[in-house]
Image (cartoon, grey):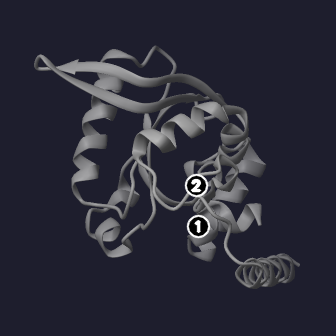
Amino acid sequence: MLYECTAISKKPEETIKKDLQQLTDTNQITHDLVFRDPYFLDFLGLKDTYSEKDLESAIIAELQRFISELGSDFAFMSRQKRIMIDNRDYYIDLLFYHRRLKCLVVIDLKIGEFDAAYKGQMELYLSYLEKYETVEGENNPIGLILCTGKNPEHIELLQLHKSNIKVADYFTILPSKEILLDRLRKAISIAHNNINNAQ
């Protein structure tokens, strides 16, 4: 299920092989091996209706478990980090640092489906961090927009695959047992195919 959740599992077979080969040969990890899609945040105990502030507060209260869901090597840095641009205040929901990617990671929490305006907001945050917060030896910051619906055509037309912005779904309630079993069967089938192709 970890493989099924990672962004790399959504990529074409050739890209997957290339990224895994790079990890094997040079021990360099790619963004798609780090970021997942979807994220299961059922441990937050949120009910049917909640706000972005409720979601953020629940994540902070369960920070250790949230970091476990994000994956290893994430270090928490800040919540509601205030930045000022043209005498205007902006607040970054959550700011992390990823040790192996050697970069800051902005997480923007959204209630509802992905909207094109979120890209511009994230680009502003990333440009600010790149200019004022990135230190020597670090890579450019990465943004992760967590929302309840990805709207794949928006993401394709905005060409987010060419940027440092990732979009992922999150679930506050686990899918049904039938859906999870179906995903498990698909993941096992993919793994078998990959093993057979490698031999």
- At horizontal 68% and vertical 51% (from top left) the residue drawn is 22
Say which quarter of the image contains residue 116: bottom left
Residue 15, horizontal then vertical, whole percent:
58, 67
- What is the three-letter code of the residue carrying label 1? Thr
Q: Nearer the viewer, residue 26 or 10?
A: 10
Q: Mark 1 and mark 2 in contact (Cβ < 8 Å)?
A: yes
Which image quarter holds the C terminus?
Answer: bottom right
Q: Which label belongs to residue 32? A: 2
- At horizontal 29% and vertical 69% (from top left) the residue drawn is 154
Residue 130, horizontal then vertical, whole percent:
35, 25
The answer to whether 126 is drawn above or below residue 166 in the figure is: above
Q: Which residue is mark 1?
A: 15
Q: Residues within 10 Å of mark 1 (few under 14, many from 20)?
A: some
Q: Nearer the viewer, residue 69 or 52?
A: 52
Say which quarter of the image contains residue 132: top left
Secondary structure found at label 1: helix
Secondary structure found at label 2: helix
Q: Farthest left residue?
A: 86
- At horizontal 39% and vertical 17% (from top left) the residue drawn is 133
Q: Earlier in the sequence, mark 2 or mark 1?
A: 1
Mark nearer the viewer, 2 or 1: 2
- What is the three-letter code of the residue carrying label 2? Asp
The answer to whether 122 is drawn above or below residue 7 in the figure is: above
Residue 142, horizontal then vertical, whole percent:
45, 39
The answer to whether 103 is drawn above or below residue 120 in the figure is: above
